Image: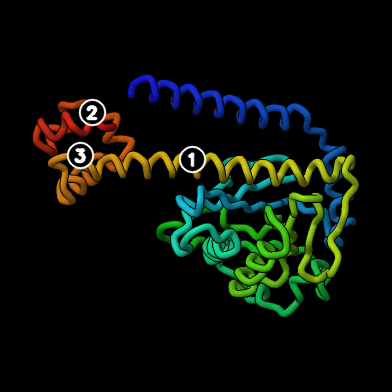
Amino acid sequence: SSDLEACAIRRRASETALVALRQQRIVDDYDAAKTEALLDDLATRLHLPAPPQRIECYDISNTMGTNSVGSMVVFEDGRPAPASYRHFGIKTVEGSNDFASIEETLRRRFRRLARDDGSNTDVPLLDPAGANGTNERPRRAPRGGGDDTDMSFSVLPDLILIDGGKGQLSAAVKALREAGLTRVPVFGLAKRNEELYNPGRARPIIIEKDSPTLFLVQRVRDEAHRFAITHHRARRGRAALRSKLDVVPGLGPVRRRALLRHFGSIDAIRDAPLEQLTTVVPRPVALRVKELL
């Protein structure tokens, strides 16, 4: 058990180091002039009203429909903004249904944005430039309490990318329309040919395989994929620990709740010294908890 835990710790440390290295390379490789040109080119190819300053990308990760997680990553001026990343543990979807999971993720993200009076216009989401010809980014005042004060949700993106094809894109469009957001350009990036789908066009937009602009889009998509997988693995690990608690002899529902209330999480229970566990449950039960976790 200790060997497995040591292996898991080393694996997590290695993954964290690789992520840090990847993001540092993005920073080191950043060239403002080149990135500005790429964003200009992306705006031209996608028929956006202006180069996208803030890009949000969404992905879903699960294992056979369990422990599903939606990820949201943010790129500002072509660079990752990790402080604005968020993940969503999927709550309303049973089984492996990426379409419904994308819809839930976007619904939860955009319900936290208080829209101004002008954001409910009927400019089609299918036509990013729209009749208004603007690229407004409405801000909102925090309403107070819980997630509503999270500033990562306080600004509309200039472009939304969805990891997936027409099905995932349709689900995203449904969630955006329910939120009353009809100005935000949204595209699905399909993996097979790396083509970009937009709900207003019958044919996908194809960017040349060797184009730096496509590399930028892929970088954003790959970061959303990595972030989703990272949190899915963490959630799956917590679920495995929780299932171990369920089979500890002498640890019924009342004592499980008492442990969780006292320590706050499964990880904290696992890491707590035996002496601390015995302040909540009898020593024989605490010994079994340590043994099984």
Q: Residue at horizontal 45%, vertical 57%?
A: 147
Q: Which mark is residue 233?
A: 1
The residues bearing labels 1 and 2 have C-alpha atoms spaced at a distance of: 23 Å
Query: In the rendered structure, which amino acid carries the disc numbered 3?
Result: Val
Query: In the rendered structure, which amino acid carries the disc numbered 1?
Result: Arg
From the image, state whether disc 1 or disc 3 is nearer to you: 3
* N-term mark: 3 or 2: 3
238 left or right of 24?
Answer: left
Residue that mark 3 sits on: 248
Q: Is residue 140 visible?
A: no
2 is higher (above) or lower (below) than 189: above
* N-term mark: 1 or 3: 1
60 left or right of 95?
Answer: right
Question: How many numbered marks have been drawn onto this rendered protein structure?
Answer: 3
Q: Residue at horizontal 69%, vertical 56%?
A: 164
Outermost residue, front side:
64
Residue that mark 2 sits on: 291
Query: In the rendered structure, which amino acid carries the disc numbered 2?
Result: Glu
Q: Give the percent coordinates (x, y) of residue 26.
A: 73, 32
Q: Give the percent coordinates (x, y) of residue 262.
A: 21, 42
On the rendered image, what quadrant is the C terminus found in?
top left
47 is higher (above) or lower (below) than 33: below
Q: Residue at horizontal 63%, vertical 46%?
A: 224
Q: Secondary structure at mark 2?
A: helix
Q: Secondary structure at mark 3?
A: loop
Front-most of 32 and 14? 14
Instruction: Report which quarter residue 225 is drawn in.
Output: top right
Q: Give the percent coordinates (x, y) of residue 144.
A: 43, 61
Q: Which mark is residue 100?
A: none
